Image: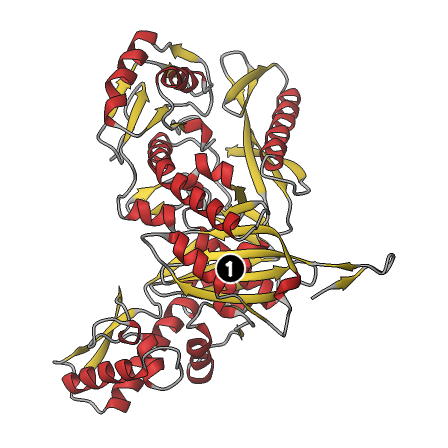
Amino acid sequence: MHRKDNMTNTTKLTACVLGIDTGGTTTDAVLYDPLTESVVAKGMAPTTRQDLKNGIHHSIDSLRPVNGADLSDVQIEKVVLSTTLATNAIVEGQGRPTGLILIGSRPKGELPTEEVVQITGKINIKGRETEPVDPDEIEAAVTQMLPKVEAIAVSGMMSVRNNAHELAVKKVIRCHSKMPVVCGHELSSKLGYHDRTVTTVLNASLIPIIEGFVQAVRETMAERGITAPVYLVKGDGALASLETIASKPIETILSGPAASILGAMVLAKTDSGIVADMGGTTTDTGVVRHHSLTLSPVGAKVGQWQTQVDSAKLATFGLGGDTEIYPDVSAGAPVLTTHRVPPACRGGEKEDLTPTDLLCAEGRLTRWDTAASQYALAFQSRRAGLDEKDYLNQAKALVVDRIVAKVFSEPAYSEGADAELPVIAIGAPAKTWYTLVKNEADVHRDILVPEHFEVANAVGAATAAIEERVDALVRPDEATEGFVAHVGGQSVFFEDKDEAVAYAKAEAGKIAQKQAESQGPETIHTDVTDKDIQQKIGWRWRYVETRVQAVARSGHLTLVPEEEKPAFEKNFD
């Protein structure tokens, strides 16, 4: 697949992006040509959860050309992965032992570690120090904690308004140890002491784990002679370099669903739609409107833990190719659960039946053990006292009904502006099931199943772009009758509001640009916006705050935070 340069008549190699998505069941890979916006090659291999490196190896080996492309002519200019590693580690409680040093009071709520030490120190909501940290207390806390843990998290109330205390503790830890240290203000600029502390602890616990993954990825690429820069997809759909993820692995939680939304929009060649990604265990849905992906207003929730990590606003329900079906003997009918079991056709228990087995038993899927699926179908239909065909049709109807109820009938998607958006169905089982929905269900919405639907997540990884967002805030300072600008973990005081806003915009823009440029050789564009928030009291309007956001990006998909309510002074950290 060569291209000719019209000016020099020389031949150029096709520069492609290698996109890899490690899902719960399969690891998908694509070679994507950004110039022609087309998939050059695709492949997939089973995900090896105990050693993700193997799945990545085999997915690359499985790449096969699309439309006769000559892969020997492809030059890989960038590698992008999405991974379930961080999500799985949090859900399964596999993070490494982590200590937490709290500055000041303890946040209300459960924390993901029992190794906690509190020290004195206090910052108020305006960013002023009201109680200093004690150097002797810091030394004692660090000395006590180091032998017990593999990473340390540091969190203080109002550290997003003044990070001096957290940095002081981190400096002492650095004098005693090289183990990973993470401060709350480094991960989030939002108020919310408990959730920020949870985010900090979880991130610290993931660093030793992600180090092995990063090294495995580097070795894999080196073995294949791939020298292109390597990125990972974050939970908000933006890219981060391996170096960044090594220190902030928690930002990769929910990266797979975010990549799926990006890939669906690229493959469907549309700027708006409801994406339904049907995987092995769940179906994830998200909405894109005019190239804008809405972000969760509170951050990603993984397992029991609410974090402050930016993520796409998603809805998830229990339905995938591996969802368990069992016979209800008393009712004489199949039951569709929300639990995942290995399909009989892929080596699962011989009596277990799943939506994938239904398709295998029917002859729609031939890549796995059809006889095993037919045995499971016969076994369950006998238990239910039904003819095999009747049992099969009833089970298929349950799958279709759940799709209709969750994707086409949910209030969030059936009312208002989203009522006319098409459903873009992706994921390995999508084509068969959404074709059945289109043909057999009473739905009033267009359904698109784009070409290469089965590797949309990997396409999303390949087409993701760098985006760094920095939020700043300007608020009245009652103590001086002036204004305070909160940006980058610092609080700076001004007499004039316009000066405070100008400072916040300039600093936020610099930070966002620097963070984006540090990710690699992409061309970065930075936009800075501000918005005044006012509160109506009686017949008058009172100024509350000015919200500033700087966005530095290399791509065209806009990540839009959901509108927040004004953060009045009574809403403490």
- Nearest the viewer among 184 and 30 is 30
Q: Residue at x 57, y 50 (%)?
A: 226
Q: Is residue 502 above or below residue 268?
A: above
Q: Is residue 30 left or right of residue 252?
A: right
Q: Is residue 175 visible?
A: yes
Q: Is residue 100 left or right of residue 483?
A: left
Q: Is residue 53 left or right of residue 492?
A: left
* Amino acid at dot 1: Ala
Q: Is residue 312 left or right of residue 366?
A: right
Q: Is residue 416 visible?
A: no
Point out the image quarter for the N terminus.
Answer: bottom right
Quarter of the image for residue 325 reads bottom left
Which percent across, then down, holds residue 120? 30, 13
Which percent across, then down, holds residue 156? 36, 22
Q: Residue at x 56, y 17 (%)?
A: 492
Which percent across, then down, holds residue 400? 37, 77
- Nearest the viewer among 395 and 451 is 451
